[in-house]
Image (cartoon, rainbow, N blue to C red):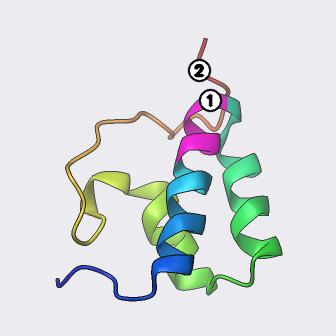
Amino acid sequence: MKPRTDRLTAAHVDLAVSLAAVHGIAVGARELCERGVALELARRVLLRPSARRGRRRLDLDLSAGQPHQ
């Protein structure tokens, strides 16, 4: 995939993935929903952050949906 050209959405996604890593997947999902990000995109980036387009690979474990400590 090519890097995202919509920089605003990319920023929202970056924030949501970071929030999910710290506070749980529900917080990241809420952030994307409030910003109007499409459900399919939100699902992909939060459930498979390592598959994000144009980004370095991330190995976050968000499967439990619990905050990382």
Q: Nearer the viewer, residue 45 or 66?
A: 45
Span of residues in magenta: 18-22
Q: Which circle marks residue 22 in the picture?
A: 1
Q: Nearer the viewer, residue 7 or 48?
A: 7
Marks 2,1: beta carbons within 8 A: yes
Q: Nearer the viewer, residue 64 or 11?
A: 11
Q: Percent from the top left, x then y, of residue 43?
A: 54, 70
Q: Which circle marks residue 51 in the picture?
A: none
**Looking at the image, is 13 positioned above or below residue 8?**
above
**Looking at the image, is 50 positioned above or below residue 1?**
above
Is 44 covered by the magenta stretch? no
Tell me the SS state at disc 2: loop
Which badge, 2 or 1, comes first in the chain's sequence?
A: 1
Spot the residue most to the front.
7
- Drawn side of residue 39 relative to residue 48, left or right: right
Quarter holding the N terminus is bottom left
The residue at the point 60 percent across, 66 percent down is 12
- Drawn side of residue 58 relative to residue 31, left or right: left
The residue at the point 67 percent across, 37 percent down is 24
The residue tagged 2 is 68
Q: Main secondary structure of the magenta part?
A: helix
Please count the marks in the image.
2
Q: Percent from the top left, x then y, of residue 68?
A: 59, 20
Quarter holding the C terminus is top right
Q: Amino acid at mark 1?
A: Val
Q: Amino acid at mark 2?
A: His
Q: Percent from the top left, x then y, of residue 46?
A: 51, 57
